[in-house]
Amino acid sequence: MLDLKTIRDNPDFVISRLSTRNKDYSQDVSLLLELDEKRREFLQLTEQLKATQNAASKKIPAMKKAGEDVSAIMQEMKAASDELKELEPKLSNFQVQIDAILHSIPNLPYSDVPEGADANDNVEYRKWGSPPDFDFEPKPHWEIGANLGILDPTTAAKVTGARFHFYKGAGALLERAIINFYLDTHSTRGYTEIFPPFLVNRASMTGTGQLPKFEEDAFRISNDDLFLIPTAEVPITNMHRDEILDSASLPIKYCAYSACFRAEAGAAGRDTRGLIRQHQFNKVELVKFTTAETSYQELESLTTDACFVLEQLGLPHRVVRLCSGDMGFCSAMTYDIEVWMPSYSRYVEISSCSNFESFQARRAAIRCRADTGDKPAFVHTLNGSGVAIGRTVACILEIFQTRDGKVIVPEALRPYMRGLSVIE
RNA sequence: GGAGGAUUAGCGAAGUGGUCAUAACGCGGCGGUCUUGAAAACCGUUUGGGUGCAAGCCCACGGGGGUUCGAAUCCCUCAUCCUCCGCCA
C-alpha cells in the first residue's frame, strides 16, 4: 500500500512511476484524490458534531446535579445524534472506497529498476558457472525421475489431482536432504530458523499483499476462512504485524521451511510435466525486516545468501534484475535467481528476491522506533526464496545425470543422505 | 463439540451508564537529585492514529454491530486465551 499523503502531495510523480508497469493508473489516482477530498470534508462535519456532543455530555450531569432542566439540551443532542447517524455511513463509505483503491495500486518501482514490458527486458546482473556440455542426449528430470522410480505424478493424479507428486525412496530422501541443507546453511549464517503454520487468516494474506486482489491464486479453507500459504513469506512477515519493533533489533533475519500451495490459476497447459509448476511444493524462504536506510544493501546480501546454497550444490545460475513490467505487485525491486535447466534449454527461476520497502509494512502496520520519543516509522520488508526445493531437485537430476541414467548426488548433500553418492 | 470465566497502555491491574481515558495504583523504560561510581530512596516523565496553517479537535478499553442525549460499563455477534467435560495424534 502506498502512502495516501505521498499520492496527495505528488500525484504526477506517482502516476509516472506506476506507468512503467505498463498500466495507466491516472484514473485510479484522480478518483482516489477526489474521494479523499470528500472524505475529509465529511470528516470535519462529523467531528464537529461529535465535539458538541462531547461538550454536552460533560454539561448534562453537572446540570442534573444542580437540579436544572436538561430536556432542552437533550432534545438538541438527539438532533445531533440523528444527524451523525446520517453522516457516518457516508463517511465510512468514502473510507471503504479509498481503502479499496489503495489496496489495488501496486508499489512504485525503485529508481534502479530497468524499464521494460516483460521478461525479455530483464537485465542479467551476474552469472555463476556455465551450462554443462553433455556428450550424450540429456533427459528431462521427469523422465529421469520416472526411470529411477523416485518421482510419481501418476499416483498423485489418482490420489489428489493434476500438479501433485509423490516422491519415493531416494527421491523423498533427496527432497528432505535439500530442505535440511538449506535450513542449516542459512541458520548458521545469521538467519533465525522458524517453522510457521501453513494456514493463515485473511488479515495476514492482506498484510503481505496476496489479498484482496489475488484471491483466485490461493487455496481457501471454506469452513474457516483460512488460506493455505502460497509461501512462508506470509506467516513470517505477519509475525510482526501490528508491532512497533525496537530499531536496535534490526535487521531481523528469518529463514523458514514450508510447503507452499498455489492454485496456479491462469497457468493451464504451462509446465505440465515435472516438478516446475505444482499446486504444492516445498521451499525455504528468507525474510528480513530492516530500516529504510539499509534495505537495498540488505537486498544485495539476501540475494547473495540465496545464491550461496546453489554454489554449494554446484548448480549453474544467474541473477537478473527484473524490469518494471515483470515485477510483482508489492515489489519495489526484484532480483530473480535462475538455474540452468537442460530440458528447457534456458535459465528457469528458482528464487525471487524482493525489497518491498514500506509497501507491506504499511499494510501490516509493522513499524520501528529509532529512539525513545521518536515517532514510529515503517520498516522495510524483504524476502526471497533460499531456495525452492522442487526446482532444486529437478535441476540436480538434470545437471548431474549420467549417460546410463544415474544421478550423482552433490557433495554438500551426501551427509544429509546417509552418505549416498549416486541415485540409481 | 458442551459449560463457565476472561480480553483496559510495554507488563500487571482499578474502573458496572455521565462530572477519573489528558486510563487510578504497581512494575518496567527514560530524565534528574543524592553518590567517587553504582544500588536504594526521592522528584519528574512515559500509547497510537486521524484532521487542521495553527490553537485545537476527533478516534481507539480484543474485532464488528446495536440500545442511549451519552457506553470500558447494557444487548447481539465474531475472534483469541484460561478452567472443567467430551473427543483425539
Image (cartoon, grey):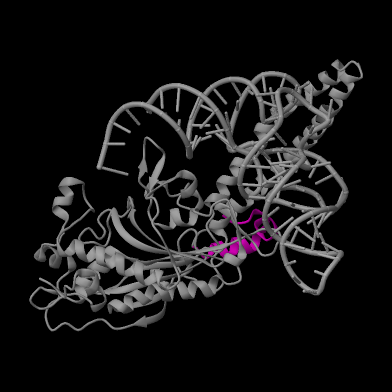
| Relative vertical location of residue A311 with respect to residue A33 in this rendering, above or below | below
User: Is residue A368 shown left or right of residue A276?
Assistant: right
Whether A20 is among the magenta residues is yes
Q: Over which residues does the magenta segment extend? A: A1-21
Residue A186 locus on image (x, y percent): 39, 70
> Against A157, is A189 above or below?
below
Foreground residue among A237 and A300? A237
**Which x, y percent locates residue A1?**
56, 54
Residue A74 in percent (x, y) is at 82, 19
Q: Quadrant of residue A172?
A: bottom left
Say which residue appears at 51% left-offset and 51% top-offset: A207
Tell whether position A69 is magenta: no
Q: In this image, A52 relative to A305: left or right?
A: right
Query: Is residue A350 visible in the rendered structure shown here?
Result: no
Asked which quadrant contains residue A396, the reply is bottom left
Q: Residue at image x 61%, y 71%? A: A293
Q: How many numbered badges does the structure rendering display?
A: 0
Q: Is residue B40 left or right of residue A162?
A: right
The percent coordinates of residue A102 (x first, y second) are 58, 50
